[in-house]
Amino acid sequence: MAAISKIATGNGHGENSAYFDGWKAYETNPFHPTDRPDGVIQMGLAENQLCFDFIEKWLMEHPEASICTAEGVSKFKEAALFQDYHGFPEFRQAVAKFMGKVRGDRVKFDPDRIVMSGGATGAHEMVAFCLADPGEAFLVPTPYYPGFDRDLRWRTGVELVPVVCDSANDFKITIDSLQSAYHKAQEANIKIKGLLITNPSNPLGTFMDKDTLKNIINFVNEKNIHLIGDEIYAATVFTEPEFVSISEVIEEVECNRDLIHIVYSLSKDMGFPGFRVGIVYSYNDTVTSCARKMSSFGLVSSQTQHLIATMLSNDEFIDNFAAESRERLFKRHKYFTWTLSQIGICSLKSNAGLFIWMDLRKLLKEKTFEAEMDLWRVIIDEVKLNVSPGSSFHCHEPGWFRVCFANMDDYTMEIALSRIRNFMVKNNETMVPPRNKLLRRTSLKLSLSRSLSRKMDDFIMSPSIMSPQSPLVQART
């Protein structure tokens, strides 16, 4: 049998990560409220499913957005015929306008710099291909999205060098940590071509303030390396302060704009991962030209371009959608984190993203990544929840887990929370001597019941939760 390429058969995809193993556990035994109530609940997928009713209502009112309706069929031939890799002008204009709206209209984007790709995955590979040769590297602050190991490395031969961030300062990026990682790479004869930041952060659910971004821009200018800003969660910021984009900061500081590049998509902000709408926005003319040629390998379908152009050009819809999405994310996040806090589970303070960074360090039998994986297997196999261990995000401290909260309906969320609650009760029982277990079990359950009942009543009556869209209100109706 003829051999096939080493790239294709190697481990570059990163599929042997616990991050993907959790997905496999879910796919083998997926939760269903009636058909498989004991199945695994998917909490490892960062999807935004909270506003589909809002979007579907708009689609029903605007059938012309689809070329497969009587109202939109006049656009069918145009969409079905060959399109070059620039994309429809109206699509690029609508996306550029939306990117500005997401950033509070504090900055404008040039439609001629909008380059399409097959989702953020394709966009990241495209940027890596344009900026670095095989064996060269990008700095990436930890913890970071596990898919970066695939997206930037697998087919490009580019390496990733971690910038270690820790919980002592809430995993914030510091110049000292950047300098340390840069110098270690130099000592290892690794050429650093750029710095990749995710802002807002996946998995932390936090974003960088303006001063931090200014420091980062000064750092890349000093080193003459590129800065890639992954801003795919820009519109998921649900409480103040407002999100700050790289595109805003470069208006205020002196820098070489040829070094600045933004990756964007509609997968998280709009909840459209299936549409595979990825965007590369570079301030470098050469990179823009090169990326546009590469987009031939991952174009957005003409049908999707037409739908997105129609939708994003509707200012009233976009304004209402953005406000509604923020409100629903805020309420879901508040209820989710509040419920966990009542059973002794903390998480990193956050106000963005579709997940929380859950702290289970106190449940580890020892402070090792082996103990973290042991705990993760219990959560997967016994609690039947697919949460993602911090080690799969290259976190340098064991005991952290990413938990997604926006990819399920209210009923499934309540089931997931009840499983976590039962797990915590059981775990607390194992930590006391046998002769005290019966008393402890009764006391703990009574205490939890009283506390949850009292706190839940207070929570329900808070003005910010009494909306009909509240997950708690909907769960009880």
Image (cartoon, grey):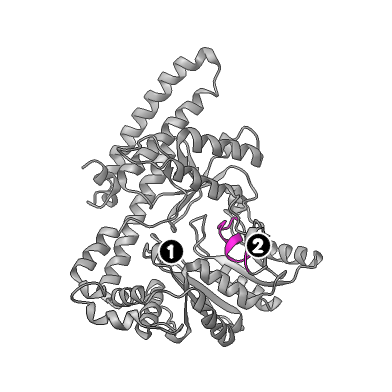
Height in image: 443 above or below 456?
Answer: above
Instruction: Answer with mark 2 or mark 1, whichever residue precedes in sequence.
Output: 2
Residue 198 located left or right of residue 46: right
Q: Position of residue 251 (x, y in %)?
A: 51, 82
**Label 2 environment density (alpha carbons within 10 Å; few <14, some 14–19, many ≥20):** few
The amino acid type of the residue labelled 1 equals Pro
Q: Position of residue 470 (x, y in %)?
A: 27, 50
Q: Position of residue 319 (x, y in %)?
A: 29, 71
Say if residue 13 shows up in the picture. yes
Residue hosting label 1: 241
Residue 350 located left or right of residue 11: left
Q: Position of residue 431 (x, y in %)?
A: 55, 24
The amino acid type of the residue labelled 2 equals Ile
At x 46%, y 82%, the residue is 85
Q: Quadrant of residue 312?
A: bottom left
Residue hosting label 2: 4
Q: Nearer the viewer, residue 2 or 409?
A: 2
Height in image: 271 above or below 310?
Answer: above
Q: Quadrant of residue 242?
A: bottom left
Query: Is residue 149 inside the magenta stretch?
Result: yes
At x 43%, y 80%, the residue is 107
The stretch in magenta equals 143-155
**Label 1 environment density (alpha carbons within 10 Å; few <14, some 14–19, many ≥20):** few
Which is closer to the viewer, label 2 or label 1?
A: 2
Say if residue 461 shows up in the picture. no
Q: Provide the major secondary structure of the magenta segment.
A: loop
Judged from the image, the secondary structure of the residue bearing numbered disc 1 is: loop
* Tag count: 2
